[in-house]
């Protein structure tokens, strides 16, 4: 018999009843039932219930065992009685009657119990990470990540892509964040940079003629953490293709994403490709973000022209970009709902959210609320038409410079969708955001900057682009590139400013 195990702790079934087997693993849970001792033995593969009686020769050894001791147990597999079968356990039809026991490792009293799923302070979890990773939820997360990466690789190879690894120690190639630097031993005073993305290397692969490249690429960026990204480093599916159009890229990536999400959907619905394509400018207008959550039915609209009308007396919105955020069915909410949203907006650095409540009066939609008296019926009717709202709804307003108004409106859209429980549950929705601008205006430094990394193909005839010499700011800012992001709909974090696109360029 093997020195440590003949089976794993997730392997035994009814067909093994009567066999003498050996298991090794950690004591997940110990229970003393009036002399009978039950040990739930755990390894990477699962749990097996083991039991020993007081007259067994190994009883003293098993009796001394505590949580997270490592044991090797030998005994006969027996069927559980019908009333003791555990349907939630893969091995729940059987148990091991312990005949021999050996202690491989002892554990002191645990600062972080592995059994159960209680929340513990992050500092404790990181200090005792080796224990934290033994917990069921963390173990499942690590395995989920591994299985997703394997699925991505399989699907990319199936489409004719090849995986290549690119250097980690390299020269600086900024991607919008600070570099991590590594001092050189051979060249004192000189430094390597860790790659923010394998941009230049993968393009070397393309010009060398390898045609279809992918990599599960580590990216190192000295920036703050985000809701969906750890600080310092993350991994991305990095892709390059030669002699292709934007449509070819979409056709290659959509089945990969859809297949992976369907494989790991866990009962949730995944929208079918092809995915909608939303121009960047439209995404900022309607969603206030270049990561739109399509599960939220709210669509923002621009009502700046309405508030610029001479008959509108609300001066706080004059000469500003004003975005209207519909709140379906919010007219029936108590005053505290509106006050709470106002306070939230102030916590985001805005003066607040103006609003009007829409009611029916004699068949006409009229506005009520703090600012409604400054807005004539004709202006309210125009906003109702533009926003697609009706009596019983409400309209909130974000007013500021265009970029700040768009950001606040996007955050308010998400907040309102959550507060009113409008966001679809159990569903993944995808879209492509396309037609990114090549440049953007840096208001702080009063200059034109790249709006992302410059490794992108202009949506321009090549010769015309190279000869481009306009000094008109609006014309320069109107230049677009073949840059695109794909994102699944989820409730986004609340960034202080729009994050840079992270997708590959064509």
Image: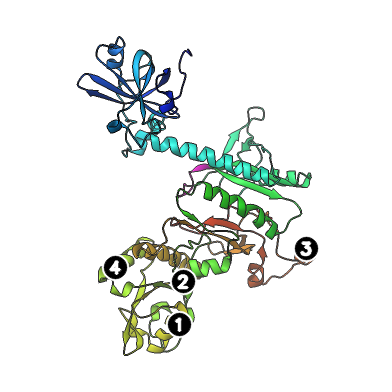
Residue 302: give x, y in percent of width and height: 48, 76
Magenta includes 176? Answer: no
Q: Could you say whether the residue bearing mark 1 is in a helix, strand or loop?
A: helix
Label whose residue precedes the other's in the sequence (4 or 3):
4
Label whose residue precedes the other's in the sequence (2 or 4):
2
Magenta includes 232? Answer: yes
Label whose residue precedes the other's in the sequence (1 or 2):
2
Q: Mark 4 touching mark 3, by CB under 8 A?
A: no
Can residue 305 be seen at all in this image of the molecule?
yes
Residue pointed to by mark 2: 300
Read off the magenta span.
224-233
- Residue mark closest to the camera, 4 vs 3: 4
- Residue mark closest to the camera, 1 vs 2: 1
Q: Is residue 229 above or below residue 87?
A: below
Residue pointed to by mark 1: 385
Identify the residue at horizontal 32%, vertical 40% (top origin).
119
């Amino acid at each position: 018999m093997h020195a440590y195990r003949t089976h794993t702790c997730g392997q035994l079934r009814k067909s093994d009843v009567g066999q003498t087997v050996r298991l090794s693993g950690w004591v997940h849970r110990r229970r003393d039932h009036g002399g009978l001792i039950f040990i739930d033995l755990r390894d990477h593969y699962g749990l097996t219930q083991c039991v020993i009686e007081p007259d067994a020769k190994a009883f003293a050894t098993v009796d001394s065992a505590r949580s997270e001791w490592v044991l090797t147990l030998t005994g006969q597999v027996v069927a559980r009685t019908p009333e003791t079968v555990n349907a939630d356990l893969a091995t729940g039809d059987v148990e091991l009657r312990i005949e021999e026991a050996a202690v491989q490792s002892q554990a002191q009293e645990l600062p972080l119990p592995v059994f159960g799923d209680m929340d513990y302070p992050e500092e404790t979890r990181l200090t005792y990470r080796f224990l934290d990773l033994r917990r069921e939820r963390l173990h499942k997360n690590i395995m989920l990540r591994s299985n997703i990466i394997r699925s991505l690789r399989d699907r990319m190879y199936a489409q004719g892509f090849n995986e290549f690894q690119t250097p980690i120690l390299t020269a600086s190639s900024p991607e919008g964040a600070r570099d991590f630097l590594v001092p050189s031993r051979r060249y004192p005073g000189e430094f390597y940079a860790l790659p923010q993305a394998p941009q230049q290397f993968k393009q070397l692969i393309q010009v060398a003629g390898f045609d279809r490249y992918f990599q599960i690429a580590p990216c190192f960026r000295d920036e703050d953490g985000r809701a969906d990204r750890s600080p310092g480093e993350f991994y991305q599916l990095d892709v390059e293709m030669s002699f292709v159009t934007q449509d070819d890229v979409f056709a290659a990536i959509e089945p990969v994403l859809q297949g992976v999400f369907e494989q790991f959907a866990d009962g949730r619905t995944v929208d079918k490709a092809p995915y909608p394509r939303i121009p960047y400018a439209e995404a900022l207008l309607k969603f206030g973000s270049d990561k739109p959550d399509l599960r939220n039915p709210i669509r923002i609209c621009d009502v700046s022209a309405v508030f610029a009308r001479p008959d509108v007396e609300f001066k706080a919105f004059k000469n500003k970009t004003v975005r209207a955020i519909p709140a379906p069915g919010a007219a029936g909410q108590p005053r505290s709902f509106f006050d709470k949203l106002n306070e939230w907006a102030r916590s985001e650095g805005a003066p607040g959210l103006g609003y009007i409540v829409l009611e029916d009066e004699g068949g006409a939609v009229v506005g009520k609320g703090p600012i409604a008296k400054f807005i004539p019926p004709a202006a309210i009717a125009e906003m109702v038409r533009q926003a697609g709202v009706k009596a019983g709804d409400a309209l909130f307003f974000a007013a500021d410079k265009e970029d700040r108004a768009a950001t606040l409106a996007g955050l308010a859209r998400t907040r309102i969708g959550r507060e009113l429980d409008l966001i679809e549950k159990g569903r993944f929705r995808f879209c492509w955001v396309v037609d990114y601008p090549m440049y953007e205006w840096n208001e702080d430094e009063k200059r034109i900057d790249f709006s992302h990394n410059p490794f992108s193909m202009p949506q321009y005839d090549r010769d015309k682009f190279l000869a481009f010499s306009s000094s008109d700011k609006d014309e320069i800012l109107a230049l677009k590139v073949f840059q695109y992001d794909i994102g699944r709909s989820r409730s986004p974090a609340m960034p202080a400013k729009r994050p840079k696109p992270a997708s590959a360029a064509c």
